[in-house]
Structures are given as structure tokens and as C-alpha cells.
Amino acid sequence: MSQEKSSALVRLLIVQALSVQPLAEVLEESGYELIRAGDAASARRVLQDAAPASAAQPDAVHRPRLILMDMELPGLPWAEAVALLRELAGAGVPVITLSRRQDAQQGGALMEAGATDCLLKPVRLSDLLALIERRIHPIARPVAAEPLRPVASMTVRERDGHCSWQTPQARALMLQYFPAPWADHARLPPEVLAWLHREALRRRAGAVPAGLTVAPRAGHLRQRLSFYLMPADPEVIGPGHWLLVLHEGDEAALVARLAKALDLPQAEAELLFWTLGQPVPRRQVHELGLSEDAYERRMRALCDRLGVVDPAQAVARARHALVPQG
């Protein structure tokens, strides 16, 4: 987490395996400042560092307003996770837990240990964000700045089309283009799921990538919506999952224009398109299903392909290519 973020942002401590990235990314995109802890020892250190220095200084600089704890931490048995929850709750900060149904049914242990709220996974992110708002009751929470090039993306389980994670932009597009119950239940509608299965088979066979474009619902004056599968790291998006990127007509046209002008494959044009405004878009790395190392490798390869020395020059080339001619 950057140390340059405004101190006015509401700080949350998220206790979750560091390999599980999407939830943290959505919280940051929603305007919260995160303190991340990937294990019990890290969570304890955060609370120790944030402890009040004296009665005259009741709040330490990095004291979180709320704790979000995943009860499935690497190498931590259930009983020890409950003990950690008790320690965290004892610090006087509200704690929201995330757990599987079979764990949450163990005798109300989570509430007894001090949890403010207990949510079952998978949790709807809209519900989680609303609950966080209710628990912290900010007097004047600043509006989160929109990314200069917001990424509409989602991670989808190939087996059944379950959307494990979506950016706010992707959720909004799915709600606008598809009627209930698909978007409400975070499931791909049948036509998109059928395309995903076909495209996954084609990708494994080494075929040229192909997208899917759907028309808006009758009576809705919107552009066409396109779906693409993007290369992604399984460690980031999870095994058995694919990363889907969504575009409305105008964005799809711009990406196609960029690919043609700079002679780039679709995936590389996508990557370059989202660097516009941010030569190193750290917040978007995980939304694109990439680890930071993978992002750096792909950007180096892209710069070599374009004959430039760094991402800033690649961005300059992209902007020039997208300037209307004539």
C-alpha cells in the first residue's frame, strides 16, 4: 500500500491470505485505505503498531476503523483462528468475519469471540460494502476517485459460470445488459457461459482468440457489449477460473484501433489501452489478472515490440495513435 495516500481515507485492516487479491482491490477502488495482513503474526503486529501511545493520543496514526477477517488463513487451524479473532476484537475495533458455512455453524463461536458480523462465503460485494458503511458510520467519507481508465473485468469459474469477483464497472454493465436473475446471483447468463466454454476449448487448442458481442436489451438505447478472455496468472485469479474483460462499443473500437495502428495483438492492445493516464497502473494490475512480476514482463515485451524504452513512451505512442485524424 502506498504511503502517499491521504490520511482522510478510512483505514481498514484486512486479514486474509495475500494471494487472495480481488477483495482487497475492490475495497481500495471503493475508497478505503487498506492495511493488509496475510497471517496471524502480521495482524498482531498491525494492532501493536496502531495501539494508542498515551491517553492524550487515543488514536495511533495507522489505527484501522474496522477489521475484515477471513477465517481461512494459511496454516492456521480453526481454534487458533477463533483465538486470533478474540484478540482482534479485544482491541475495540469492529470485526467482520468471512467463513465457510460449515465453520460458521460451530456453536456461534465467532460471535462469542467478539465478531461484530459474520458473513458466509461467497459474499456479495455490494452487501459487504454496505455493511462496512453501516459499521464505520463516517461523518464525511470522501468520494473515491474514478480510475482514469476503469477496467470492467471479472473472474469466472469455468465449470458453472460463477463470478467470483467483479469490478464495479463490470457489475454495472452486467446489470444494464442482462436481466435478473443472472447478475443478481453473480452468474454468467447462458449465452455468455456457452461462449466461455467454447472459447476455453479453443484457447487450449491454440486457436486465435475470439470475443463475444451482445446487443442491448430491447428498449435500451445502449451500445453493444463485448467480452474477451485475457491471459491471467492462476495464482491471482484462482484455479479453474478465467478472467473476462468487458467493453462497450466505443471502448472496443478504440482498442481495435490501437491494435491496428501499432500492429499489436488484441491482448497487448488491451494492456496498453489501460495504461493510459497511468504508466504504472498498480491498482489495475490485479484487475487484469496479473501478478506484478507478470505485468512487468508483459510491459517490457510490449516496449520491445514498440521500440520504446519504457511504459511512459509506450503510453505516448498509444495516445498519438488514438488522436483523431484530420
Image (cartoon, grey):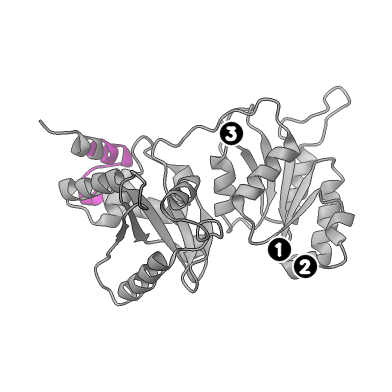
* Badge 3: residue crowd in 10 Å (few <14, some 14–19, many ≥20): few
Marks 2,1: beta carbons within 8 A: yes
Pointer 2 or 3: first along the chain: 3
The residue sitting at 82% across, 51% down in the picture is 115
Magenta segment, which residues? 304-317
Q: Amino acid at mark 2?
A: Asp
Quadrant assignment, res 16: bottom right
* Element assignment for label 1: loop
The residue sitting at 13% across, 33% down in the picture is 325
192 or 12: nearer the viewer:
192
| Left/right of residue 94 with respect to residue 265 in the rendered view | right
Residue at label 1? 72
| Left/right of residue 108 with respect to residue 8 in the rendered view | right
Residue at label 3? 3
From the viewer's perspective, is the residue at label 2 or at label 3 nearer? 2
Q: Position of residue 204 (x, y in %)?
A: 34, 75
Q: Amino acid at mark 1?
A: Glu
Instruction: State yes or no: residue 241 in magenta.
Output: no
Compared with 91, 86 (above or below) is below
Marks 3,1: beta carbons within 8 A: no
Pointer 2 or 1: first along the chain: 1
Q: Which mark is residue 103?
A: 2
